[in-house]
Amino acid sequence: MKRLLQQNTVFIVSLVIVLALAAVGVAAPKELDAWTAWLHGAIIDRFGWCYLVAAFFFLLFSLAFAFSPYGQIKLGQDHEKPRFSLFGWFSMLFAAGMGIGLIFWGVAEPMSHYLNPPPYLAGESGEAAKFAMRYAFFHWGFQPWAIYIVMSLSIAYFSFRRGMPPLISSCFYPLLGQRIYGPAGLCIDILAVFATVFGIVTSLGLGAIQINAGLGSVFQFSAGFGTTLAIIAVVTVLFMISSMTGLDKGIQILSKTNVMLAVLLLAFMLVVGPTTMVFNIFTSTLADYLSSLFSMSLSTNPFRGYEWTQSWTLFYWAWWISWSPFVGLFVASISRGRTIREFVLGAMLAPTLLTFLWFSVFGGAAFHLELHQGASIASAVAEDVSTGLFKVYASYPLSNVLTLVTVLLLVVFFVTSADSATFVLAMMTSGGLETMSALKKLTWGGTVSATAAVLLFSGGLEALQRMAIAAALPFTAIMLLMCYSLLKGVRYEHRHEKRAKKPSLLE
Amino acid sequence: MLKTAVVKVSLKEGPGRMVEMVAALRSFGTQEVHLVHVRSSAGRAFPERKRLQLERVREKAEALGLAAEVHILEGHAPTRILQAAWQLDADYIAIAWVHKAVLRQALLGSIDGDIVRMSDSPVFIFKHRFLGRTESLDSVLYATDFQATDSRVMPYLKNKEFQARAMYMLHVGERAPDPATEKTRREEVLANLTRLANECAHAYESVETLEAVGPVGRTIIKTAKVTGVDLVIVGKVDTPDMFKKLIGSVADQLPHRASCSVFIIPGYGPGRGAESEAGREAA
């Protein structure tokens, strides 16, 4: 019994605390809201700059790693080959890392920045439009992937190369030694479970609201809590089924299907929409993004526009960092057998390129309607962020089909996100075992869905999102230490083991 | 092996501390000391008061049974001291370390630090202890990395003229990335330490091996404090590593931070400590 308790410490402690917090969210949503708003405000206000510096550091660190001699090291044993094809790998990367959020913000983010840019720019101006696209690229570009890469690279290296369990605490062996099995390691793993649960619950809640809005616009019903609850129930059943089939089948097949659907939707919008304008936006924004990457990466706009930076850039960075344990563990588990260079460049360039195209096509379509056809997309987004995309579809042929395809995309991204989160949560709370018990998957799946539903009802969802973002602060420190630990580990291998493998001239 | 020493005398050390250091040199089997004072203000007459001070130190060194000679030189102090060591065929350079405040050191630099950094000969840095013995050695600690420096340092440690009762052999390494590799690494470290300990076991009453993981400089200092040794011995390698050049090697940092005396033996270069001795013996 004692041994069983020891093995399941992370599972028991994190489950109890998550349920307790969810109970507080139900019983006293206003108090929780006020408390988390204060915590979130205090963190972003005081430590926001840390997120900017850390995210930029992660980008430089990942690139330096890829182009260093360490880039040749394989995330697995030397003879191992990648378990998934390139397409399967990219699809799962994209589905886990961005997917649902990109559909949510594809139209909404450029329109929001266009309507409400920082105070040094006039809203609804040409400069605001340029700024809107550049910052949409920035918020979904290299930095988020660099954050994920740092986490997943560390986990993959220490797990598949060094034979340790795929846990975040394992990445600290060069620094902590055997203490990773003690309270320090447990705290790291429990914090990772929190961030994952809070992140996925928020994401599912917001995803369900958008699916509801989409279905409401097609079938002409007013989206209410009952339908949102039904959507969560259906999606829960779907991701539980997918989760039971494992990585090779469920998640991979769904992710591939989804990326194909997304590419089809993208191609349709590109051909039917303002193609030339989209390409103009893509090329000029790409140039704009690359040339101002350095200044955007480190600028908090302390004189004018600091509030804007806080509510957008700093929020995003904290959000990506809080998501990183989940995406990092998942991405690590699908990247076994790739070299560090292949992994970093693949994970940084392929999803980013698709994301840039997505923003150019959907943001470009929205700008075309807003600027040339007098459609008020921006004001619709200002009213309700979740309906922006469907407002764009309303001006396109086959709008109902497009809406249904998008809803399907949302559902499948929803399922893959929840499925991979369940997989990761079960793995993190099973001491890193890849063959974790079905009961744990079911427990986490049920907890995540029930918490999302209950908090949607009580209004505590935003509070939980703030909790996830609050968890990003300790995680930033953890990730910085992780970079150092990874560097130590890889340097050790390069110095000692590679040297030992070189044939001696004396032999 | 350490028969002749060039002793840097700045006259800021205080006569008591200088004599204490000269007495400590006897623990290495030193028989001859060259007291070198370098003055930067060329042209002006050398103050008689300083000359008398130097003479007093020489007399006290001779009273301790050492052959002593005073040299007054002019120019850039570290360069002149190193040149003197070369010209006088000294086996090592001895410095009575004078602590400088961080700001002062940052602005004015440190002559002693520059000697340590520039020297290709062994350098002994004497640190006065307010409590406990300083004139004779009881225990010493050799921090080894099992690299090139071992071949240079071990001849000194094996030499019976090097008079100390106990020897601690310390290796500070970096932890391997996983438990299995770490176990193998530690086994290798222990085997190497035991080999080195056996090599010099005849020269000491007791030889103890120690193994630690962590930042090298800090761990050496901590271990020296815990074991209460009188002297830390380290090898020094000129590294092409840019980062280490910026922050200084462990050997460069130790004199500033250690509370006991430090002996730095260069791993390679035109240093003539062990090699010149071997050459003399062969002749």
Image: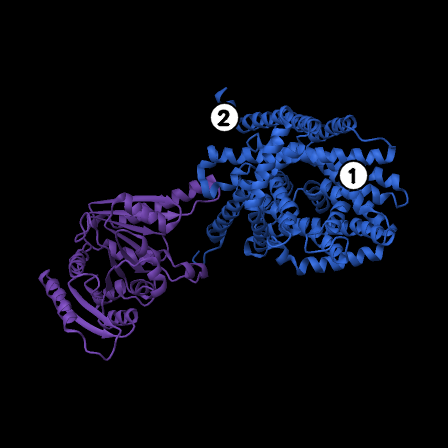
Q: Looking at the picture, tell me which residue is in the foreground, B120 or B199.
A: B120
Q: Colour of chain B?
A: purple
Mark 2 nearby-residue class (10 Å; few <14, some 14–19, many ≥20): few
Determine whether, in the image, residue A265 is placed left or right of residue A289: right
Mark 2–mark 1 Cα distance, whole angstroms, equals 41 Å
Q: Position of residue B88 (x, y in %)?
A: 21, 71
Can the viewer see residue A77 in this picture?
Answer: no
Quick one: which residue is furthest to the right in this view? A397
Quadrant hosting residue B238: bottom left
Mark 1 nearby-residue class (10 Å; few <14, some 14–19, many ≥20): many
Q: How is the structure coloured here?
A: by chain
Q: Which residue is mark 2?
A: A6
Q: Which residue is mark 1?
A: A409
The residue lying at 48 percent from left, 21 percent from top is A2
Q: Looking at the picture, tell me which residue is in the foreground, B28 or A326.
A: A326
Pointer 2 chain: A
Q: Marks 2 and 1: CB-CB under 8 Å?
A: no
Q: Position of residue B269 (x, y in %)?
A: 34, 66
- Chain drawn blue in the picture: A
- Type of residue at label 1? Leu
Q: Secondary structure at mark 2?
A: helix
